[in-house]
């Protein structure tokens, strides 16, 4: 059932171009968006997105999308905090729950807290028959197929795609996106499977880098804007399966504390496509390099050229439309975690202390 791969995780990473293409065919058939008409974002004051772990990082990326593409303010929270906080919720809002399994206890409890308090409970799930799907007004499938590896990979990118399509619908419903921009974003999403295939071809290079990353005790991941949640996800993936201590930070936060950790033993993985904020990230990178930190820059050819000398290593990614870069850059982050774990000889599919579905709090 591993289809010739050594681990489910490797299989599930490799499947992403195919499952994402399936999800695109489902949600963005020629010329339209296939989402329920009742999912109408007009007149809403707010969205609340709640989840755990990797699914929470998908919500964190989606916040940038809903705010920038649809002008819709978003609150995000981890379910274990949200459920006991008794947060006030405007009735004129949707609460969105993201869960691969659809059975996560904290996420389900957070959903139940919102029932009757908001206009609609929406879930984004992989398991269509799950409790979270059943208790929602609208349950949107991410269409990733069964995910077996404990570390979530293809579910994350499919969650992101589903949320991106929702943000585009919200942008159109609310008159925030011009027809032209809308069409450009749809076209950009449709290029992702091809770009993912190109990104996967970097795996042998990543495996080589991972041999050195595996020596580290501490690793930092940096990102800005939509790439900040991806830095958090990259760090989570790495710590889950390789047991190396890793932390993700917003690049601009570096000088507010974590820079104290930097020395020549600390790899700093910078997730930075050549976007609007790139120059700022380069100056953060230079601060790391001045303290002899080992920078691994993951960017596109333009970014790598613009960053100049001084990085320990760089990894060239295809160019991708700015808002959707996290969907593509998830792949090198996953591959880096996977190959680092392989280099350390840890159990990739069954990491210690972790379960695939966390049905107790
Ligand atoms: C990370 C991971 C976990 C889950 C989290 C939520 O690789 O798998 O962080 O993302 O436990 O699980 P679901 O999505 O099933 O609610």
Image (cartoon, helix red, strand yellow):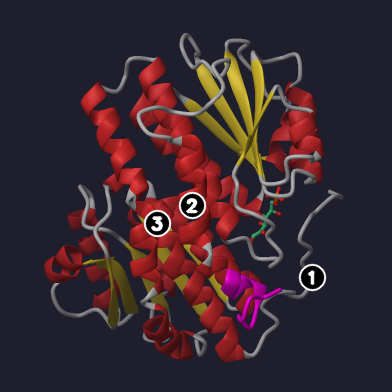
Question: Are the residues flagged by discs 3 and 2 in contact, CB closer than 8 Å?
Answer: yes
Q: In the visual, does 197 lie left or right of 341? A: left
Residue 196 x, y percent position in the rendering: 39, 62
* Chain-order first, disc 1 or disc 2: 2
Question: Are the residues flagged by discs 1 and 2 in contact, CB closer than 8 Å?
Answer: no
Residue 207 x, y percent position in the rendering: 45, 85
Q: Quadrant of the N terminus?
A: bottom right
Q: In the visual, does 27 lie left or right of 223? A: right
Could you say whether the residue bearing mark 2 is in a helix, strand or loop? Answer: helix
Quick check: is 317 in the magenta stretch? no
Span of residues in magenta: 1-11
Residue 303 sits in quarter: bottom left
Residue 156 x, y percent position in the rendering: 56, 53
Which numbered tag is attached to residue 227? none
Disc 1 packing (10 Å; few <14; some 14–19; many ≥20) = few
Quick check: is 8 in the magenta stretch? yes
In the image, residue 27 above or below residue 329:
above
Which numbered tag is attached to residue 20? 2
Secondary structure character of the magenta stretch overall:
loop
Q: Kindly identify which residue carries mark 3.
A: 193
Could you say whether the residue bearing mark 3 is in a helix, strand or loop? Answer: helix
Residue 188 sits in quarter: top left
Which numbered tag is attached to residue 353? 1
Residue 41 x, y percent position in the rendering: 49, 17
Q: CA distance from mark 1 to mark 2?
A: 30 Å
Residues 179 and 323: in front is 179
Disc 3 packing (10 Å; few <14; some 14–19; many ≥20) = many
């Amino acid at each position: 059932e591993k289809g010739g791969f050594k681990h489910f995780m490797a299989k599930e990473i490799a499947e992403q171009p195919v499952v994402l293409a399936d999800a695109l065919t489902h949600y963005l058939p020629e010329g339209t968006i296939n989402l329920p008409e009742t999912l109408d974002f007009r007149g809403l004051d707010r969205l609340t997105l709640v989840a755990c772990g990797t699914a929470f990082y998908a919500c964190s990326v989606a916040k940038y999308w809903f705010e920038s593409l649809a002008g819709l303010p978003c609150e995000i929270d981890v379910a274990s905090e949200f459920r006991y906080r008794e947060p006030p919720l405007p009735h004129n809002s949707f609460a969105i729950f993201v869960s691969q399994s659809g059975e996560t206890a904290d996420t389900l409890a957070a959903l139940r807290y919102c029932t009757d308090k908001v206009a609609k409970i929406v879930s984004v799930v992989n398991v269509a028959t799950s409790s979270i799907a059943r208790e929602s007004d609208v349950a949107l499938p991410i269409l990733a197929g069964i995910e077996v590896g404990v570390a979530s990979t293809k579910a994350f990118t499919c969650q992101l795609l589903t949320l991106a399509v929702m943000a585009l619908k919200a942008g159109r419903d609310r008159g925030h996106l011009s027809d032209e921009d809308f069409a450009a974003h749809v076209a950009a999403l449709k290029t992702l499977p091809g770009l993912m295939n190109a990104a996967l071809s970097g795996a042998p290079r990543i495996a080589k880098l991972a041999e050195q990353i595996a020596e580290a005790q501490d690793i930092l991941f940096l990102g800005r804007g939509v790439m900040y949640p991806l830095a958090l996800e990259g760090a989570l993936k790495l710590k889950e399966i390789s047991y190396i201590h890793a932390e993700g930070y917003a690049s601009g936060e570096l000088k507010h504390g974590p820079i104290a950790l930097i020395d020549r033993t600390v790899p700093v993985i910078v997730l930075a496509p050549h976007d609007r904020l790139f120059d700022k990230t380069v100056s953060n990178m230079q601060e790391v390099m001045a303290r002899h930190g080992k920078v691994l820059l993951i960017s596109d050819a333009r970014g790598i050229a613009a960053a100049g000398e001084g990085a320990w290593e760089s990894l060239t990614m295809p160019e991708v439309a700015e808002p959707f870069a996290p969907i593509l850059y998830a792949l090198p982050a996953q591959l880096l975690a996977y190959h680092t774990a392989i280099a350390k000889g840890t159990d990739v599919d069954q990491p210690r202390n972790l379960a695939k579905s966390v049905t107790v709090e």
